[in-house]
Image: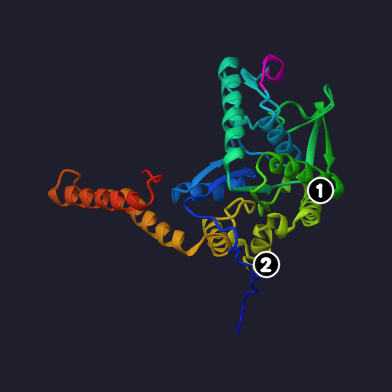
Amino acid sequence: MNFQTHIPLSKETIYPINYHSKIILLGSCFSENIGNKFNYYKFQSQQNPFGILFHPKAIETFITNAINLKEYTDEDVFFFNERWHCFDAHSEMSSSSKEELLQNLNDAIQHTNQQINETSHIIITLGTSWTYRFIETDTTVANCQKVPQKKFLKELLLVDEISESLESIIALVKDVNPSINIILTVSPIRHLKDGFVENQQSKSHLIAAIHQVVEPRKKLFYFPSYEIMMDELRDYRFYKEDMIHPSKTAIDYIWEKFCEAWIDDESKNTMNKVDSIQKRMNHRPFNPNSKEHQNFLQTIQKDILTLQKSNPRISF
């Protein structure tokens, strides 16, 4: 008897991800979960230079500014609750120093501009269709920075608005890097602060919009993160205690599915070697000064050097 449905995945063998690939991950906090996996396995990846960006308009603004090398100035930041903030970035970028915030914003823009030109794959995870428009400037923000909600208008992006935003992102990126592969996905994280019905409405808008632009022949792909969580892992035991975020088990499962679809076989062998080294490096010895442990460390170092001969970009 089969007690679980499985989503069929087509392996994108023409454009697989390997250790030569350069990857950018942008979007919802689920992109951080997958980005952390790429980091753990020592792929060449960068995730969310402006911090978590929840909706497509925020991602569009970031990519537009990165490609155009926007220079952030005093006019782009504001002081609130004893810290300096920028409405284009996540609050993790905020700082007690205006100069530090501006430096970090502009460094991220410069670095991302270079990355977009060189990257082979960009993975965009959309989290919500709900946005907040700052009334004072009539602009949609990436993050409200805990400014009182009365200063914003809450709006739900329509399907056509999302698809237009995605088309703009695709056109911008393809203009400077025609060979790039763009992978779109919807975050399985539930935005229940918007409401149960509103969250489903939001996710459905994202999914419908994405499928208006996906076209594998144009290197525009969809990976079903949301559907795997909803259909294959349809049980609350696969959520954290908050019943909102996927558990470690769920993240691991979706990552395995992603590898099945996107990582080439040779790289999977390298991943196993990296994983072995990582686990041994994280091992806590009973006696760090013992001869046995020193031999253990030498063996790890030998394995690292062997791995680096075929993959010199990997560093621990």
Q: Which residue is mark 1?
A: 163
Q: Earlier in the sequence, mark 1 or mark 2?
A: 1
Q: Which residue is at a point 76% across and 38% down the rendered structure image?
A: 57
Q: Secondary structure at mark 2?
A: helix
Locate the C terminus and report the quarter of the image it occupies. Answer: top left
What whole-number distance in Å separates the C-alpha atoms at marks 1 and 2?
25 Å
Q: Secondary structure at mark 1?
A: helix
Q: Which residue is at a point 58% across and 48% down the rendered structure image?
A: 120
Q: Which residue is at a point 62% across and 45% down the rendered structure image?
A: 29
Query: Residue 299: horizontal and vertical position, in percent?
Result: 22, 53
Asked whether residue 74 is drawn in magenta, I would say yes
In the image, residue 142 sits, relative to residue 42, either above or below, namely: above
* Left or right: 271 in relation to 285: right
Can I make out residue 283 in this image?
no
Query: Residue 202: horizontal and vertical position, in percent?
Result: 79, 50
Q: Nearer the viewer, residue 148 or 157?
A: 157
Can I make out residue 189 in this image?
yes
**Kind of residue indicated by mark 1:** Ser
Stretch of the chain drawn in magenta: 71-78
Q: Which residue is mark 2?
A: 231
Query: Residue 99: horizontal and vertical position, in percent?
Result: 58, 15
Q: Nearer the viewer, residue 85 or 159?
A: 159
